[in-house]
Amino acid sequence: MNGIDYTKGRLLPLFDSLMDALEADNAIDAGEYVMTLAVTLNNVRSDEQLLMFFIEDLAAAGGVFEQLDCGAQAWQRLENLLREAEDIARRFTGAANGAAST
């Protein structure tokens, strides 16, 4: 499995879970924002696009959420998603650094 498929497989279900929590909170603006992120990730086709998704889209997610109205469960799910994204980024950064040093 390549990095793009792995990332989508790990993060898209977390986006779905987050959207469910936002729907329960009736947090429409936050739900639309999360849907946009999920669609962007789903449309990633290259390593460069994946990198830009992490840098441009996910890096801003926490700050955007601070401005949106959502409940504690949605916040917890966002934190889980961002933590998983960080683990994925660390994994692939470590793999790339290991490959570069051999």
Image (cartoon, grey):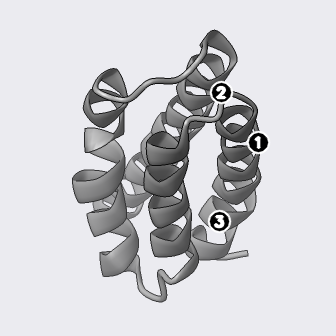
The C terminus sits in image quarter: bottom left
Res 87 quadrant in image: top right
Label 2 secondary element: helix
Front one among 43 and 99: 43
Q: Amino acid at mark 3?
A: Lys
Residue sitting at 30 percent across and 78 percent down?
48
Front one among 32 and 3: 32
Residue sitting at 77 percent across and 52 percent down?
13
Residue sitting at 46 percent across and 64 percent down?
36
Q: Which residue is mark 3?
A: 8
Between the residue at mark 1 and the residue at mark 2, the CA separation in whole angstroms equals 10 Å
In front of the other: label 3 or label 2?
A: 2
Whichever of labels 3 and 1 marks the residue nearer the N terminus, that label is 3
Going by the image, does 32 lie left or right of 47? right
Q: Which residue is mark 1?
A: 20
Q: Which residue is mark 2?
A: 77
The N terminus sits in image quarter: bottom right
The crowd level at tag 2 (other Cα within 10 Å; few <14, some 14-19, many 20+) is: many
Label 3 secondary element: helix
Residue sitting at 46 percent across and 36 percent down?
86
Between the residue at mark 3 and the residue at mark 1, the CA separation in whole angstroms equals 18 Å
Whichever of labels 3 and 2 marks the residue nearer the N terminus, that label is 3
In front of the other: label 1 or label 2?
A: 1
Front one among 34 and 44: 34
Q: How many marks?
A: 3
